[in-house]
Amino acid sequence: MAFHGSADGTATPAAIPEAGREGRMRKLGSLRTLWPFVARHRGLFSAWLLALAVSSTATLSLPVAVRYMIDHGFGGGSQINQAFGLLFVVAVVLAVATAARFFFVSLLGEKVVADLRGQLYAHLVGLDPGFHDRSRSGELVSRLSADSELLRSVIGTTMSVALRSTVTVVGSLVMLFVTSPRLAAYALVGIPLAVLPIVLGARRLEKASRASQDRVADANALAAETLASVRTVQAYAREPYERGRFGQALEVAVATARRRIGAQAAVTAAAIVLVFGAIVLVLWSGAHKVIEGTMSAGTLGQFVLYALIGGGSVGALAEVWNELQRAAGGMGRISELLQERPAIAAPAHPLALPVPLRGEIRFEQVQFHYPEREDAPALHGFDLHVRPGETVALVGPSGAGKSTVLSLLLRFHDPQAGAVRIDGIDLRDVDPAPLRAQVALVPQQPVLFASSAMDNIRYGRLEASDEEVRAAARAAEADGFIEALPQGYASELGERGARLSGGQQQRVAIARALLKDAPVLLLDEATSALDAQSERAVQHALENLMRGRTTLVVAHRLATVLRADRIVVMDRGRIVAEGTHAELLAQDGLYAELARLQFLD
């Protein structure tokens, strides 16, 4: 939201209401961003408009048919058949057109929301890790689901009701004047009175709607976080505590929703009372005209029906306005996400990486700090040269910046100063996607999806054959336990690989990296979850994988890096020593201290 103020940052009195008006218009105007999604389905949109036109025409013809029935249907002879036949035909046309309108607009709503969700999901997946680090996944899912559902109702119901009611109000108003200008003038008194509470309540309803959606998102985020960590919750016996927290979040959401519902109910009630108050006034006046003989009973019936149709449509517009306020809040939240731009993006004219990639890595005076920790540099004056095919291990205490080195190589972040190069090319000049295609990562916490073992390993190279997947699993010492699963490689591993042990999850992740067969390999504590026996087997597989590839190994357990070509010791974002295991022990520095702590009997 834009803010207006003086040069010193203080809002001026004139700026405040202007900002408020602009903010309200911008929020409601956010619904206009739906049009490109609707325009993709012009056929459905046109069919809906046609059905809407027919159903509205039938609705406005109904009072004429009723007047004809009243004035001529009770006179006997053939007129009674014609009168009731005409009424039935109008009813059939109305029924068919209404059904067609419902079908087309509901299907349009489904397609538009599916397109919107698809675009939003694609956008979220493309945002940089920094955005996801500062965002709660539960809230993002809420915007992807709950807010999208609001828009489904806008397209599938509200939009149809709004246009139908508008057409009906205008048509009814015209026909009221055609039927009886004097009575129509009385009816007009109710229209501005009905619109008044809508306008007065709009701002309050808008704020209440946005607040209600925010509180629902908070509750969803809390639930997602707790369910993702349910083992920790149960291990500490914190189920009652988490139930209480979620219950409090729900109470806040319900209380906020109660205020929104109350505002919406008040606006709707006021509009309906005022509209139908005007209709009662018209009926009273019309009844006197029928008694005086200046108006036929059929004409009064026609007028009353038009007044009822018009009044009902005005009441429907009041509810539509309420729904639009809610939907505008949801679309505003979605628009906020769609307006997010990744901090890491492809340059306008990206440089192509050499083919094949040699894998020479250089960090040149790199200075980097995470956005949320500007006063604590993760890397400071960092220089490192890794030759093609070399295996370099990064060791040091927690917080030394080891994993940050891997993040910069994957271009999850860009350094604030200095440069990171592969084969002499600055990574800031490279499209992140082809860069990451040349790098295989085995993270400290393996990430497995709720799909089969075959699909989880094939994630490393989607076009790989089943035999290639099995070969990678055998090389990672994962084939045995996968075959022992109930459906073998077709077995579902559960969310986050919950059906496997920690060591088994790590070996599936290693198999995925083996299958990718990239020239640069990053191992971030890749064997940390393995027992001694499995570690020896997987270490042998990793040694085969590392041969001929540039490899960076991050490790706390020094036993896993003894065979590295070079060991780089890091502390507080700097390199404090480097060499072989024996050379570093002889220096009796930080590495020797870490070795004594780990190998002490």
Image (cartoon, rainbow, N blue to C red):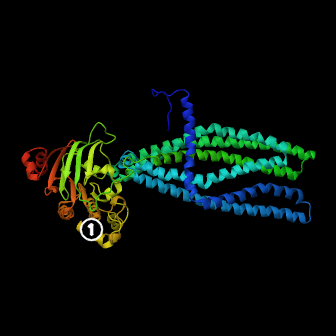
Q: Residue 293: horizontal and vertical position, in percent?
A: 93, 47
How far across and how far down the image is residue 448, in percent?
33, 60
Residue at the outermost left position: 586
- Residue at the (36%, 62%) spot, across then down: 494
Which residue occupies the foreground of this view, 147 or 218? 147
- Front position in the image: 51 or 386: 386
Q: Position of residue 172 (x, y in %)?
A: 77, 49
Amino acid type at image mark 1? Ala
**Displayed quadrant of residue 205:** top right
| Nearer to me, 5 or 324 | 5
Helix or strand or loop: what does disc 1 sit on?
helix
Tell me, yes or no, if residue 290 can be seen here. yes
Label 1: few (<14), some (14–19) or many (≥20) C-alpha neighbours in 10 Å = many
Q: Which residue is mark 1?
A: 472
What count of labels does the image hold?
1
Image-based side of 353 in relation to 592, left or right = right
Name of the residue lying farthest toward the bottom:
467
Position of residue 225 relative to residue 89, above or below, is above
Asked if residue 258 can be seen in this view, the reply is no
Horizontal relation, residue 184 to residue 566: left or right: right
Residue 575: x and y in percent read: 18, 44
Tell me: residue 415, above or below residue 455.
above
- Residue at 26% across / 40% down in the picture? 377
In which image quadrant can residue 47 be found? bottom right
The answer to whether residue 204 is above or below residue 525 is above
